[in-house]
Amino acid sequence: MRSASMRLNASHLEKMRIVGYAANSLTSRYYDVLRTQILQDMDKNGWQFLAITSPTPNCGKTVTACNLAMSVARLPEREVLLVDMDMHKAQVSEYLGINHSNNLLSVLEDRASLGDSCVEAKFGPESVSVLPGTPARDGAAEWMASQTMANVLQAIKREFRSGIVIFDLPPLLLGSDVLSILPRMDAVLLVTGVGTTTPNEIKECQKHLQRSHLVRVVVNKVSETSESYYGYGYS
């Protein structure tokens, strides 16, 4: 799958709390542990599509998705595609510092091909393939449930068959968007926020995810809007 390429700016990544590119970073080691646990499950089961969601906004799901994708990309012989599928508040491009004219909506509306819409985001000797997103002005839930989206996912599976695909989804409890796409995902990572996520919200998410393969619940110690670094707990 041919795509445009660009080199990411380390200063911008650091500012946005994207540390997964730095193998020697103490903070990136949290993501490396999470990466190892998730890949073991995915490899064992032959899974390819990993969905990342949260109960509500500001839990850190997009930061987690970006850092996890970079951590996977640092492994030898591993390829990863990061898809921004949050059609309400697409932020992957902002966090990585990517500026690209095409995106997921371009593909859905048949204005651009999948290859022309992806970006090879380079950092050091490694790179992450990124399919940027953009907010849909209306009909986000309808796009997620559409046959067109199903066709795009099949195209991703076909053209990126040797790699792991990470999807940054909208928050689970904000509408029907995530529920309609979950059956097409192989596994789910739920990101919760200390001081943001309530016990009732976690229970509600678990109810919605009963038929999904929930590989991990990440407990994020600060919100996505905080300027400080954060740690993680796993369950």
Image: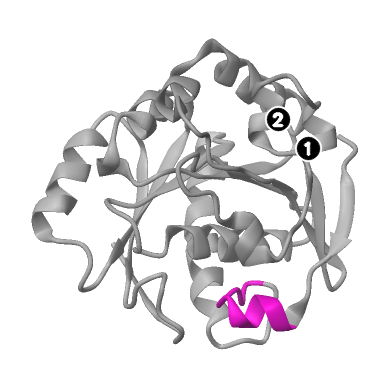
For residue 172, above or below residue 191: above
Q: Judging from the image, what secondary structure is the residue with disc 2 in? A: helix
Where residue 218 appears, as percent x and y from the top left, is: 35, 63
For residue 48, above or below residue 109: below
Q: Judging from the image, what secondary structure is the residue with disc 1 in? A: helix
The amino acid at mark 2 is Ser
Q: Quadrant of residue 108?
A: top right
Residue at position x 52%, y 34% in the image: 136
Residue 12: in magenta span: yes
Question: Tag on residue 106?
Answer: 2
- Using residue 199 as the reference point, say whether residue 205 is left or right of it: right
The amino acid at mark 1 is Ser
Where residue 84 appears, as percent x and y from the top left, is: 58, 45
Q: Quadrant of the C terminus?
A: bottom left
Q: Quadrant of residue 96?
A: bottom right
Compare marks 1 and 2 and give the one earlier in the sequence: 2
Q: Which residues are magenta?
A: 11-20
- Using residue 49 as the reference point, say whether residue 187 is left or right of it: left
Asked if residue 22 can be seen in this view, the reply is no
Residue at position x 83%, y 33% in the image: 115
Query: Mark 1 to mark 2: distance in Å?
Result: 7 Å
Contact between labelled residues 2 and 1, with CB atoms less than 8 Å apart:
yes
Between 28 and 2, which is closer to the camera in this rendering?
Answer: 2
Residue at position x 79%, y 69% in the image: 8
* Residue of label 1: 117
Residue 41: in magenta span: no
Q: How many marks?
A: 2
Residue at position x 59%, y 36% in the image: 48
Q: How is the image coloured?
A: one colour
Q: Quadrant of residue 194?
A: bottom left
- Using residue 53 as the reference point, say whether residue 32 is left or right of it: right
Q: Quadrant of the N terminus?
A: top right
